[in-house]
Structure formats: C-alpha cells, structure tokens
Image (cartoon, rainbow, N blue to C red):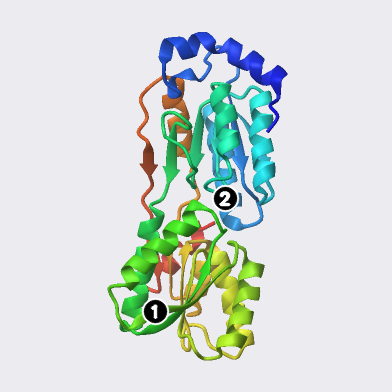
Amino acid sequence: MPRRPPAVSRLAAALAACVLAAGTLAACARKDDRRYTVGFAQMESNNPWRLAQTASLKQEAAKRGYGLVVTDALGQTPKQVNDVEDLIARRVQVILLAPREYRGLVTALDEARDAHIPVILVDREAAGVPGRDYVTFLGSNFVEQGRRAAEWLARATDGTATVVELTGTAGSSVAADRAKGFREELAKHPGMRVVASQTGDFARARGQEVMQNLAQSLGTGFTAVYAHNDEMALGAIQALKAAGRVPGKDVTVVSIDGEKAALEAIGRGELGATVESNPRFGPLAFETVEQVRRGEAVPPKKLVTDRFFDKSNAGRFVGEAY
C-alpha cells in the first residue's frame, strides 16, 4: 500500500533520537508538544456499545486535559486502515485502535510503527507482537465470556439444549474467542449441542434477519440461542416472537455485553442472562497512555473484570447501564 511520505517521513525524522535512545515502542511518545493529542480509530458507531466506548474515551480525555481525535471506520476495514494513516499524518502522539478484524490492520500497525507512534489496542486484538507492533491490548477475556455464557445456559436448561449460535463479525478476535469459550464449556455437557451457527455481524437488524431465516428452516428444532452480543440477541428475540415462539419459555436466550436494553429484556423474562463486556475504557486507556508518556514498561495485556447479569441482579443495574 502506498505510504504518505511527507507527513510520515517528517514524523519519523523528528522521533529518530527517541527511538535510538529508548529502544522500545512504548517509550517513544512525544512529550514536547504543548497539547498532547491522542487518536482513537473507532471501527463503527452503529450500536450502544461502541457509542458508550467512544463517550468514555472523550470524557476521560477531557478530564485529564488531553486532545482526542476520533475517527469512525463505519464498519469497513480498509477505511480503518486509512483512518490510522490519517491519524499518523495529523501527528498524534498515541493511537488507540479498536480493530475491526484480527488480520486486517497489519498495514496500519506497520505504518504507525514506522512513524514511531505507539498503538494501544482497545477491546479487540490484532495480529502482531506486543512491544513491537503495538504497546498492549486492553480488553476482556473473550474466551472466558463465552465459557460463562455456556455455563449459565447449561444450568438453565438442565444440561439439555439444541443451540443456535449468532456469531460476531467474521475475522474478528472477539467472535473467534467467544465461540471458542462457549464450545469448550459446552463439550462438558453431552446433552447440549450447536445445531446452527451463522454470523449476525454484531448488529441487531442482521441478528433478527438471520434468526428469522433459521426459525423458518429449523422450526422447533432448537431450544436455545447464544448470541455473541446483546444487539444480535435483541434482534433474535424479535424474530422468535414473530415466528410464534416465546423467548424465555420455548427458547432460552443468552448473550454478552450488558447493555441497558438487554437488562430490560432480562426483566421482561425474554433474555435469560448476559455476560458483561464493559465498554467504559476511558480510565484504563488514559492510564495506559500516561504510562507510555512516562516511558514506563507496559504489560502485553491489561484485562478488565466483567460482571454477570441475570434475573437475580439485572434490575439493580439498569439505571447505570449504557
């Protein structure tokens, strides 16, 4: 892919002394600018989770006195690569990156590394080596999220269920990990099996469409739905009701994220449970930015702690949900 020579090469030249002296990616954030500016390459802004994440980063940036430049890839990996290149050209000091795909951001990471701009991965992983291609990954244990969803579903169905799985964006680390954890736990329960697995691309409308098609083709041949996020679960619930099935009675639904609409659906008895995936990365992200700014060593991963919501506690947390 063609580079953007003028901006990138000038930036690389300006930072050459830092690279030679520090020897690490994390230590090369510039400290001489009057206003320290961070770039955030968001993958999309079409759902409550992404909106809450961006809002959290904006709030924390303002609180700490940082400039923040936000881009939106609109769910398109090539655009996200271009967005990172634009942030490099704008001479931001650090880039926060929420990768749409695991392998699709290699070029972007290469360009940032060549420009000696530290990249912090936020909420999704990308191909590369921490400390070389990016500083660290901030996010949840997605395998554990899938495992917890399966564990709850096994208890709720007495270990007997035929499951439809609605998966997230193809090629994303989070979709692969949530599927992996779910299947690893499901393997412990011989009476449970996945009878269909299709992507809903983490979108409510797409999840509803896929569930509608599966309800037509499978009929009553499934008794549970595992959705990789709440948005798809909420779409699936609408499709199930349209097909004459009763979510929470005929079909047990479990998902991941913990958004407000999901907690409300738990209160109505339509959604059984949701594993939290906290979108409020602002404090952790800027704590890490400041570590980078000070030239401190940063671990290759920083994992957040996620809660679990079901009928026993969902009502207590609706007010603080996003």
Rendering coords of residue 24 (x, y %):
42, 20
Residue 148 shows in this picture = no
The residue singled out by tag 2 in the image is: 52
Question: Which corner quadrant of the image does residue 137 belong to?
Answer: top left
The residue singled out by tag 1 in the image is: 193
* Foreground pick, 48 / 115: 115
- How busy is the neighbourhood of tag 1: few (under 14 within 10 Å), some, or many (20 plus)? some
279 relative position to 275: left or right: right
Gap between marks 1 and 2 measured at Cα: 34 Å
Query: What residue is at 48 percent from the left and 31 percent from the top?
Result: 133
* Foreground pick, 119 / 48: 119
Disc 2, SS: helix
Rendering coords of residue 218 (x, y %):
55, 87
Instruction: Tell me the quarter of the image containing the C terminus.
Output: bottom right
200 relative position to 221: left or right: right
Q: Nearer the viewer, mark 1 or mark 2?
A: 1
User: From what the image shows, is residue 186 above or below residue 91?
Assistant: below
Disc 1, SS: strand
Q: Earlier in the sequence, mark 1 or mark 2?
A: 2
Query: What residue is at 53 percent from the left and 70 percent from the top?
Result: 166
Query: What residue is at 55 percent from the left and 11 percent from the top?
Result: 32
- How busy is the neighbourhood of tag 2: few (under 14 within 10 Å), some, or many (20 plus)? many
Amino acid, disc 1: Arg
Question: Which corner quadrant of the image does residue 70 belong to?
Answer: top right
